[in-house]
Image (cartoon, rainbow, N blue to C red):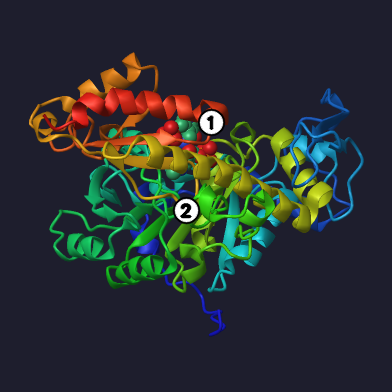
Amino acid sequence: GAEAETGRSVDLSEYFTEATKRRKNSPLKTLGKYMRADPTLVSLGAGLPHPDTFPFASIGATVAQAGTSVTDAAAGRVEVAVGRAAAGGIEELGRFLQYSDGRGVASYARFAREHTERIHGPRYSDWDVVVSQGNTDAFGKALALFCQHGDTLIVDEWTYPAVIETVGPMGIALAPVAMDGGGMVPEALDRLCAGWDGARPLRAAYLIPTAQNPTGATMDLARKRAIYAVAQRHNLVLIEDDPYYYLQFGPYRAAAECSGDPDARYAALPGLAGLIPSLLSLDTDGRVVRLDSFSKILAPGLRCGWVTAPRYMTDKIQFHNETSIQQPSGVSQALVSRLLNEQWGAAGWERHLVQTQRDYAVRRDLFVELCHRHLRGAAEFVVPRAGMFLWLRVLLSARARARRGVMQEVFDAMIAHHVLLVPGHMFSPLGSADDRVRDQPYIRAAFSYAPVDAFETAITRLARALEPFVREE
Ligand code: PLP
Ligand code: PMP
């Protein structure tokens, strides 16, 4: 930022749960520093398995050239072999397959750190990254920093079901905040906090700022600034779960308004330079815990991601890793590190992200166009500017609205017409069965996965399924 903030984060460690306060690093892991400091030291310390016993001489993958598909002919190759480190400090295979600490293998963690610095430019000095197995893992650990049995987590009024299912069994309550087409409403968050009279203070809010799951809403910069200001006023931590951040593709223009040339139509994709700034990039206090995941930009099965936060928080997540996952799989870290640091490099990584933006932009544009054509009068929606989801509000007739359980009837009708969408109530922090949400007229469509040539079939089936519920008689 222009003000060149390099001050330290504010100290929010008073918010740590009792378990987090007690969490320390594993004493054995602290011995590693002696091995690193003294090359002549003979270690009879750590009980590491001998790498000669590992039955892998090399691992490799055939990969797409950056910005192309694996089905294109000119594929590339990454290969990580025992005893052969690569330029740029990329470790040899034995190192990836060995134990280390919960911070991650160095070249993988370094890529995450450099990417974060370049894209999000954190504005306080003591920020750091720690590896995760993706945002599901990272969310559980970010939550455990601040919330325990009896606490309340602030969430959007519709939110990601895995979060609802994580907090419920832990005895953590959810406080839903109203949303609009641009995400969580800052005034509603402010009112909740100002009027809070719970036994324990509100400490943390969970947000999905880009392509929110399920509503598809993307917060613009003004909205993020407003939410951040409310968080400052009430001293909240913001858990920024942003797996769709890099899948931004901007406003929709109907094909008829554009030239027929797809390259021209998709010339203005944001790439990395044009992305809406993240909450992390606005964070001068160190109150944002940002969760990044490779799931939507490489593949979910890698189980690879990272967390960015003040160092005293990433330390606690590191120690938590050391008693749970240790690290993402070494095989995954080796492939990701070699692919991004070396095979693609920074320029190739950006080409890949632009191509991924374009793949989903093409899907969004076709899906939206077909919804405009076939669902007129049956459903309305905010056009998503990022991600994978379209959130439909079904325009139920007065007669349908008067019926208890009508959204179950809608669901049954969709299934009978061979098309599956997710009923809105499944995303409610109040629980699916709650009378306040059961018949809310929302359904979520994912346009990320179905074959593109099945879109029209799906949407015309949906239109037929909805028809009896929206017709005024
Ligand atoms: N958070 C949100 C909001 C998601 O929508 C998803 C998956 O779609 C995840 C987290 C899970 O991500 P990961 O595969 O990184 O655990
Ligand atoms: N399982 C996992 C672990 C996921 O990450 C996802 C994607 N979010 C899903 C299931 C699909 O969930 P949803 O349709 O709610 O996005």
**Residue 200 in which image quadrant:** bottom left
Residue 32's x, y, as percent? Answer: 72, 49
Residue 433 in sight in this render: yes
Q: What residue type is disc 2 on?
A: Arg
Q: Which mark is residue 437?
A: none
Residue 270's x, y, as percent? Answer: 60, 60
Query: Does label 1 or label 2 sit earlier along the sequence?
Result: 2
Q: Which residue is mark 2?
A: 385
Q: Residue furthest right?
A: 84
Residue 102 in sight in this render: no
Q: Residues within 10 Å of mark 1 (few under 14, many from 20)?
A: few
* Secondary structure found at label 2: loop
Nearest the camera: 271 or 312?
271
Give the quarter of the figure containing the N terminus.
Answer: bottom right
Q: Is residue 222 left or right of residue 309?
A: left
* Secondary structure found at label 1: loop
Q: Which residue is mark 1?
A: 449
Nearest the camera: 174 or 65?
65
Q: Residues within 10 Å of mark 2 (few under 14, many from 20)?
A: many
Residue 320's x, y, as percent? Answer: 51, 44
- The structure residue drawn at horizontal position 82% and vertical position 30%, both measured from the top left corner, is 50
Q: Residue furthest top?
A: 416
Nearest the camera: 316 or 197?
197
Nearest the camera: 210 or 359?
359
Q: What residue type is disc 1 on?
A: Tyr
- The structure residue drawn at horizontal position 51% and vertical position 64%, both measured from the top left corner, is 276
Q: CA distance from mark 1 to mark 2?
A: 17 Å
Q: Is residue 464 left or right of residue 69?
A: left
Callout 1 touching callout 2 (CB < 8 Å)? no
**Residue 163 in which image quadrant:** top left
